[in-house]
Amino acid sequence: MAKTPLWTKKLSEVLGYQTTQITRKSERTGNTYEVDVIPRLELVSMGEAEEVVKEDGQKSYRYSVFDMKKDLQYQVTCPNLIKVNGVKQVVFVNLTGGALNNGRGWYKADSVAFANVKK
């Protein structure tokens, strides 16, 4: 039987930044897998992060961000919280993502911190 072609784009095509592959280990199964990440991405965070509680009780935080270079707006989930009042430049480490069934995407990162903005 013939295979159906897939139209899933890579992270580098969707966000427009070069990616690298890293190895991760699944917390649920213990299996290792390869994932494309953007090692360091500076974005603008708009307002306070939204707390997200998983079924197992673990907390993470969803940041609404804007990419001024690519004119994109989306949300990134991280395990750590930084207090963003207003609009601030932040840096996400090891940002990854994928497609959802509705055609949009999900994005998460290992961490987020304020960018060192020089005046």
Image (tube, rainbow, N blue to C red):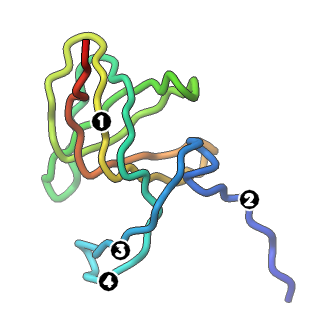
Residue type beneath disc 3: Thr
Label pair 2/3, CB-CB below 8 angstroms:
no
Image coordinates for residue 45, horizontal then vertical, percent? 33, 23
Q: The residue under label 1 is which amino acid type?
A: Val
Determine contact: label 2, label 1, CB under 8 Å: no
- Residue linked to disc 1: 91
Q: Nearer the viewer, mark 2 or mark 3?
A: 3
Secondary structure beneath label 2: loop
Cα distance in 3D space between marks 3 and 1: 21 Å
| Residue at image mark 4 | 31
How far apart are the alpha carbons under marks 1 and 4? 28 Å
CA gap between label 2 and label 3 equals: 24 Å
Residue 115, given in percent of the width and then of the height, sits at: 25, 28
Q: Nearer the viewer, residue 30 or 70?
A: 70
Image quadrant in which you'd find residue 10:
bottom right
Residue drawn at x 30%, y 47% is 93
Q: Does 104 sit left or right of 81 as displayed?
A: right
In the rendered view, tell whether residue 79 sits above or below residue 117. below
- Residue 56 horizontal side relative to residue 97, left or right: left
Q: Neighbour class for label 3 at 10 Å: few (<14), some, many (≥20)?
A: few
- Packing grade of label 4 (10 A; few <14, some 14-19, many >=20) is few
For disc 3, the marked residue is 23
Residue that lies at the very extreme toward the front in this rendered image: 119
Q: Tell which tag, 2 or 1, sits nearer the viewer.
A: 1
Q: Position of residue 9 (x, y in %)?
A: 66, 55
SS at circle 3? strand
Whole-percent x, y for residue 11 in the image: 55, 52
The residue carrying mark 2 is: 7
